[in-house]
Image: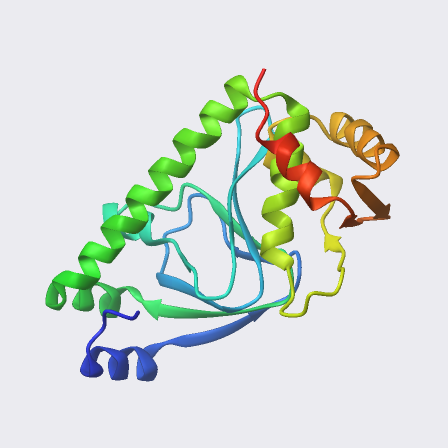
Amino acid sequence: MGTCQKEELELISTSKISQYYKKGQSIFQTNNRLPGLYCIHQGKVKVSRVSSDGKEQIMRLAQEGDALGYRSLMVGNTATTSAIALSDCVVCLIPRPDFFSIIGQNPQFSIELTKLLAKDLGRMEERMMHAAFKPVRGRLAEALLLLHDLFQPATEMRFSIPVTREDLAALTSTAKETVSRLLSEFREEGLVATYGSRITILNLEKLTRLSALYE
């Protein structure tokens, strides 16, 4: 919203709706007609879709300051993905009429949205390339690094990442059993420590090198 004018910010401030979501709660679902633009004020969110055979694939991870649902709003379609809270969240909803009012009045805002759409396309192309050419060990290492950046606190103290094996499988485009086996290998190699559904990265440098390897 950094490109919005004072009057537009005032419009958003008076019309936005703040909603609280508990961890695991759905913010919106595939095929929903979105009532507006979602902006994450607090918390972490996964954006995913489910294939015809019931397998979930996480398309992106979002956090404070990120927007959700803009592609579906822009093209006038129902949502092609679902958004689920990975932690307790506060999400602001900018109603659809106000969203389009700002687009019509503010060319710079439209340009920034176009950049977001282009970034999303680039991210999807990169995921497809990784799924085709990067070994599963590398994809899992990359997923752990993404989650590390997402949940990293302001302090430099060691922390654990709250993530289920199912979400790791959805991030790496592989089976839950494969994720569990590889996590055991990572643990034996001193890369991570696991405590139930929480993972602590012990060797960030080695994990980073592993994430860059291709077959």
Q: In front here: 55 or 64? A: 64
Q: Is 88 left, or right, of 50 in this rendering?
A: right
Q: Residue at x 40, y 69 (%)?
A: 93
Is residue 170 something that shows in the picture?
Answer: no
* Vertical relation: 24 (above or below) 75: below
Q: Quadrant of residue 57?
A: top right
Q: Residue at x 84, y 46 (%)?
A: 194
Query: Residue 202: image x %, image y %?
Result: 78, 47
Q: Residue at x 34, y 44 (%)?
A: 119
Q: Quadrant of residue 188?
A: top right
Query: Residue 151: image x %, image y %?
Result: 64, 58
Query: Residue 193: image x %, image y %?
Result: 84, 46
Q: In front here: 116 or 33? A: 116
If the image is split into quadrants, where does the C terminus sit? Answer: top right
Q: How many numbered marks does the figure carry?
A: 0
Q: In front here: 27 or 145? A: 145
If the image is split into quadrants, where does the N terminus sit? Answer: bottom left
Query: Residue 99: image x %, image y %?
Result: 25, 65
Q: Quadrant of residue 191?
A: top right
Q: Residue at x 29, y 52 (%)?
A: 73
* Vertical relation: 9 (above or below) 114: below
Judging from the image, the colouring scheme is: rainbow
Is residue 90 something that shows in the picture?
Answer: yes
* Vertical relation: 134 (above or below) 105: above
* Vertical relation: 107 (above or below) 132: below
